[in-house]
Amino acid sequence: MKHSQDVLIDKQQLQELHINYQTYKSLFAHYPGMMYLLDHNGLIQNINHYGDRLSRHHNVKINKKHYTNFILSSEHDEVNHFFYETLKGKVTHFKTVFLTPDQEPFDVELINIPVYIDHEVSGVFTLVRDITEERAAAIALRESQEKYRLIAEHTSELIRLVKVESGVITYASPSHEAILGFPTETYTGQSFYEDIHPDDQDTGVHLLHSTKDEPAVAEFRRRHRNGSWITLEDRATSIPYGISGERMIVVVSRDITEKKRAERELQRTLKQLKDLKYALDESALVSVTDDSGIISSVNDKFCEITEYTEDELLGQSHMILDSGYHPQSFFDEMDMQIQSGAVWKGEINNKTKNGNDFWVDTTIVPFIGDNGLPYQYVYIRKDITDRKRAEELLRTSDKLSVIGELAAGVAHEIRNPLTSLKGFTQILKSRLDSDSDQEFISIMLDELDRINMIVNEFMVLARPQALTHEKANLQDLIQNVLTLIETQATLNNVQIVTRVIENIPDISCNENQIKQVLINVLKNSIEAMPEGGEIILSLFPIQDEVIIEVRDNGEGIPDHRLSHLGEPFYTTKKKGNGLGLMICRRIVQNHQGTLLIDSKDGEGTVVTIKLPHLLSNELR
């Protein structure tokens, strides 16, 4: 019985051994990594299928070979050390480098486990894990960390790591000292809001707490060590980890103090330019042309003075305003100067859309491109029409002054012998009976009367005359003038049509002088129609004035001559002396009135005389 019992125990042990063997075999075969068995000499006794593939030696017989055959030679001493430590009964854990059959290295992590048989270490069981990718990732991570460290330490921007809830700074880049003046370590552990300007505190709080979903940007001021305030632009971004579960953000700050100063300077400059443009637009005609002289821009005053719209001017040249006053050589010289890059200044006579002349004091400024040639021209014009008229009046006044002095001397020297000549001529007329003699004497008397009339006109110019103004009815006065001029009109085949509104207010005037004006104007109209025609004489009141209008359909006066009418010795007549119209203007002006002439070449002339009536004086 005892023998059978021993055999039964052996069967049970055998069964347990079989189960253990199957367990070991299953583990060895299905372990998802390299696993091999070494004897106490370091020879490979067995290697699992996965390890065979992992070692890339599946086409090479490796059993019974020493493990160092598959390890980088520089690693042998270290690997042997751990192998012998394991034979002493220690579990060893280390990293080394395996070699493929092509001698390509790959990183592995080894765990050596001693194999006990009958309480004696008979070999080493080794677990191998390929850490090539893991090590590469670790190296890449270290390299990345090193790059970010270098960036953080050498960037000119401020970098801070901040706990969102507490606002405490956990890291500050070395650039803090360069930008803000304080040592970098001053900021570590300090509140993010510590050095923010009091007025910008809310902005700082909003920046930290608005970065949950996306980066936030804000501008605020931080205190410099010297007490000044540095303007920074902060960009805050959440990072996916924190300390003790607290959210953290990275804040990158850029010094924009100079940028803000430049922006303020730019805004100030832009305002100054805007103000200058406003002042220029209010006082001058401004236009811009391209390098070909084509208008690309005009201001409102330019349109107002020239009477053209902006659309009518754009795309045109300034010759649209040419009045014909200046010769072509004038503009050729101007173009030559500005095309050379020089500024041109001068006075130009222009014409409006409606044909009215006006003068402008002009400055043309070329804008020079990188190639040294003008790419556009800016024209700045000032309307000097009134000044030119004043200068013209001054010249006329100077002429009148000279004429006055001349007239005084001539009249004095001529009147005495003229009186004698006329007296003796009349005596001769009474003594001579011959018809031919009488005819000659009559001609002489007429010419002496003409000389006397010219002398009288000289006397008007020579000195102001104290004349008595009396109340006069213009309707009666005009009727008297028409009676005097009617014969000359009939002889010249001219019909005078009168249009008089009833109840014309009386005026205060010297009747003889006003008659002289009307006679002179009507005679000019008659002489302007050598082939005959029609004169329309109108009389009507407007507000506080009485208007006398003389309109003919004669030859008219060219524009270039119209502006000179009334100047001393300037006349459109072949036998005129230019004094008649000048005297008429003087008489009307002495009556506080105005004399205007409007004429078009070939279309006739309109002379308008405006005189204040007595009712207007009473109203005042």
Image (cartoon, rainbow, N blue to C red):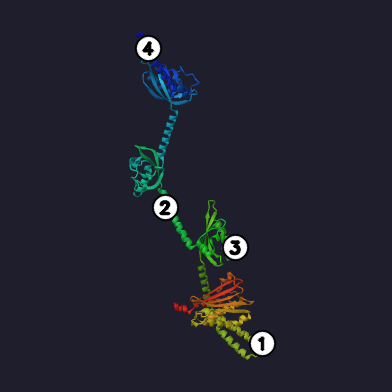
Kind of residue at disc 4: Leu
Discs 3/1, front: 3
Gap in angstroms between the C-alphas marked 2 and 4:
104 Å
Q: Distance between the residues labelled 2 and 1?
A: 100 Å
Horizontal and vertical percent for residue 364?
53, 59
Between discs 3 and 2, the one toward the N terminus? 2
Q: Disc number at residue 328?
A: 3
State the mark number for residue 8.
4
- Looking at the picture, tell me which residue is in the foreground, 348 or 243: 243
SS at badge 4: helix
Give left or right: position of 68 versus 424: left
Task: Tell me the distance, in whole angstroms, between the alpha carbons under discs 4 and 3.
Answer: 140 Å
Cα distance between the residues tagged 3 and 1: 59 Å
In-front residue for pair 177/577:
177
Quadrant of the rendered image containing residue 482? bottom right
Total number of numbered discs in the rendering: 4
Mark with earlier residue (4, 3): 4
Looking at the rendered structure, which numbered label has been put on residue 436? 1
Q: Do the residues labelled 2 and 1 touch (CB within 8 Å)?
A: no
- Residue 319, position in %: x, y? 57, 62
What residue is rendered at 37% in x and 9% in y? 4
Which tag, 2 or 4, sits closer to the chain's start? 4
Seen in the picture, residue 123 relative to 140 is either above or below; the reply is above
Whole-number angstrom distance, CA of label 4 to CA of label 1: 196 Å
Callout in the foreground (2, 4): 4
> In the rendered image, which residue does mark 2 sit on?
264
Instruction: Give the structural element (helix, strand or loop) at label 2.
Output: helix
Please name the amino acid that badge 3 sits on. Answer: Gln
Depth check: 88 or 396 in front?
Answer: 88
Query: Is residue 174 shown to the viewer in this render?
Result: no
Q: Are marks 4 and 3 in contact (CB under 8 Å)?
A: no
Badges 3 and 1: C-beta atoms under 8 Å apart?
no
